[in-house]
Image (cartoon, grey):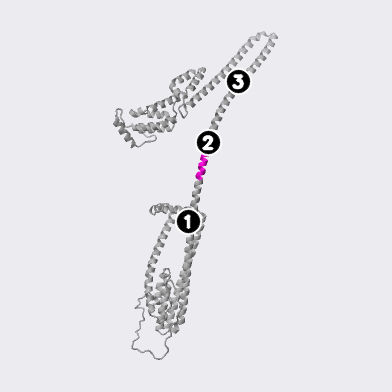
Amino acid sequence: MLRATRLSSLARPALHATTPRSNLIVVKRFTTEATTTTATTTAAETPKKNRLGRRLLTTTFLAATAFGGAVVYSFKNEVFRDTFTSIVPGTEELLDRIEVFARKDEVKKYREKAVVITQATSTKAKEYGVKAKDATADVYVYVSDTVGKLTGSEADPAPAAPQKKAEAKPAGPAPSKSTPRPASGPAPAPGPTLIPVPITEPVLIELSRTIDELSSILNDAGLADKSKSIVATARTELAQLSDHFKTLRAEESAVVSAFTDLHQKTDRLQASFDAYQRDLQQDVAHQSEKLQDLFDIERRQLLESSKDTLISSLAQERLRHAAELSDSLVNQAVELQRKWVRDIMYRVENERAGRLAKLDNILIRLRALERISLDNAERIDTSSRAHQLWTAVRALSHAVHQNRKTPFADELDALTDVAGASLDHAEIIKTVVASIDDRVAEHGVHSVSDLTARFAIVREEVTRASLVPEDGGFMSHFLSVLLSKVMFRKHGLVPGNDVEAICARTEWYLHENDLDAAAREINQLQGWPKKLARDWIEEARKHLEVKQALEV
C-alpha cells in the first residue's frame, strides 16, 4: 500500500505546529531508494518535537487565558478581587494601573485597536486554516485518484489511520528472482529532476514525502513517463500551498509586532501619566503651602486690625455718649430756663393785672420743676455710674480671663472706687470685692487653658504616686513609678473611684471648659496623689472664687 493514507491523519495536528525552518525538501528521482528511508526517519522525529512544543504553547496559552479571565472577573466582583489580590502577589498594583488606564481616552483607543487587530488576526488565521485544510484535502483526493488511475485500483473513500511500514507494502506476491525480464522493449525513462522547493510546515513535509514515495513506486512499476506531468503538477501545487503558509506566518509576525508596539505605547503613556501626576501633586502641595501662609498672614493682620478698630470704636463711642449726655443736659436746661422765663413773665404780667393771689401757685409749680430737674440729674448720674461700673467689671473680667497670669489689683481698686459712688449696690460690691484675697489680686490667677496644660504634668506625677500608701516609704514610691509605666491610661467619663478614672474624668471636664466639675473630681483624691495635686487644686479654687465673684 501507499503511504498516502498517512496524510489525512497527520494533516490536522501538524497545521498549527512549529518546526525548524531549515528543512529543505529536494525532489528526488523516481529511481532513488536511499532517500526514502531518510525521509521516514525525519518524519518520525518531527512529531515528537512538535508534540513537546505544542504542549508548552497550550499550557502557556491556558495560563494566560485563565489569568486574563481572573483579572476581568475581579473588576465585576469585589469579593473575588479581594481573594485574587491576596493569593496572587502584585495583582493589586496591576489592577489599580488597569483602572487608571481604563479611564484614559487614549488607552481606550489603543484597546479598541488591539481588539480589532486580534479579531482580524483570528479571522485570518481561521480562513488560512480552512484554506490549508481544503488544499490538503484536494491534494489528498488528487493523489488518491492518480494512484487509482495508474494502478487500476479504486481510491479509498476516506483516509484511514496510520499503519506500520510493513503493512503499507503491497499484498501481492513478490516477483521471483528467477523470473527473467523481457528482453524486448525500451528501458524505463528516468523521472524528471525538479528544482528544490523550501518547505517548513510539517503537513507539507509529510505530503512531499508521500509524493516522493509515490514517485518511487511508479518508477518501480515502469510508469515514469505517464506520471511525469502528474508529479510535476503536484509539486507545483505543493509549492503554492507552502507560499500560502509563508504568507500566514508573515501576517502572524505582523500581528505580534503590532501587539509589541501597542505594549510599548502603553508603557510610554503610563510613564508620561506618572510624571504628570507627580508634577501635579508637587504643584498642588506648593500652592497649598503658599495659600496657607497667605491665609495665616491675612488672619493675623485681620485680627490686629479688628482689635485696633474695636478699641478705637469703644473709645469714640464712650466720648460720643458723654458728649451727647452733656449736650442733652445743656439743651434741657436752656429749654427749662426759657420755659420758666416765659411762665414767670406771664405770671408777672397777670399779677400786674391785679392777680397777686396766684403767686403761691406759681411758686409750687416752680418747685415742681426744680424737683423734676433734680430727678433728671440724678438719673443721669445713676446712668453714668452704672456705665462706669460695667466698664470696671469688664476690665476686671478681661484681666482674669487672659491666657497668661495677669495681676488685676488695679482693676479691682477701680471697681471698688466705682462701687463706692453707687448707693444701691455699694455694700454688695464691697462684700464681693472683700472676698477676693489681696495676694490673688496682686499675682493674678491662671486661666482654664493654663490649668489644663498644667494638669497634664500633674497627672503624670499623680499616676506615678497612685499606688503609694499614705505611710509608704522609698520602695513604695519606686514600685509605684515602675508599675505606672505599664498601666493603661483611661480617657473620657469612665466609671470608678481609682486614681486613673478620676484623672480621666477631670481631664474630660477640663477639655469641656468645666473647671468647677474638674475641681470637684480631683478633690476626691486621697493620700499622696491629693498631696501632689494640692497646688493645682488651690489654683483652680482661686480661679473659681474670682469667677464666682465676677458672676455675682
- Label 2 sits on residue: 299
- Label 1 sits on residue: 267
How far across and how far down the image is residue 269, in percent?
50, 55
Q: Which mark is residue 58?
A: none
- Separation of marks 3 and 1 at Cα, in angstroms: 86 Å
Depth order, front residue of 330/369: 330
* Mark 3 closeness class: few <14, some 14–19, many ≥20 residues within 10 Å: few
Query: Is residue 482 inside the magenta stretch?
Result: no
Rendered position, 441 above or below 204: above
Q: Secondary structure at mark 3?
A: helix
Rendered position, 410 above or below 80: above
Q: Which residues are magenta?
A: 284-299
Query: Is residue 297 inside the magenta stretch?
Result: yes
- Label 3 sits on residue: 326
Count of all numbered marks drawn on residues in the image: 3
| Cβ atoms at labels 3 and 1 below 8 Å apart | no
Q: Report whether residue 57 is seen.
A: yes
Closer to the chain start, of discs 3 and 2, is 2
Inspect the image, locate mark 1, and give the three-letter code of the amino acid beneath it: Asp
Closer to the chain start, of discs 3 and 1, is 1
User: Residue extending furthest right?
Assistant: 353
Q: Secondary structure at mark 1?
A: helix
Inspect the image, locate mark 3, and give the three-letter code of the amino acid beneath it: Ser
Q: Secondary structure at mark 2?
A: helix
Q: Main secondary structure of the magenta part?
A: helix
How far across and how far down the image is residue 524, in percent?
36, 28
- Separation of marks 3 and 2 at Cα, in angstroms: 40 Å
Depth order, front residue of 411/58: 411
Q: Quadrant of residue 186?
A: bottom left
- Separation of marks 1 and 2 at Cα, in angstroms: 47 Å
Rendered position, 310 above or below 225: above
Inspect the image, locate mark 2, and give the three-letter code of the amino acid beneath it: Arg
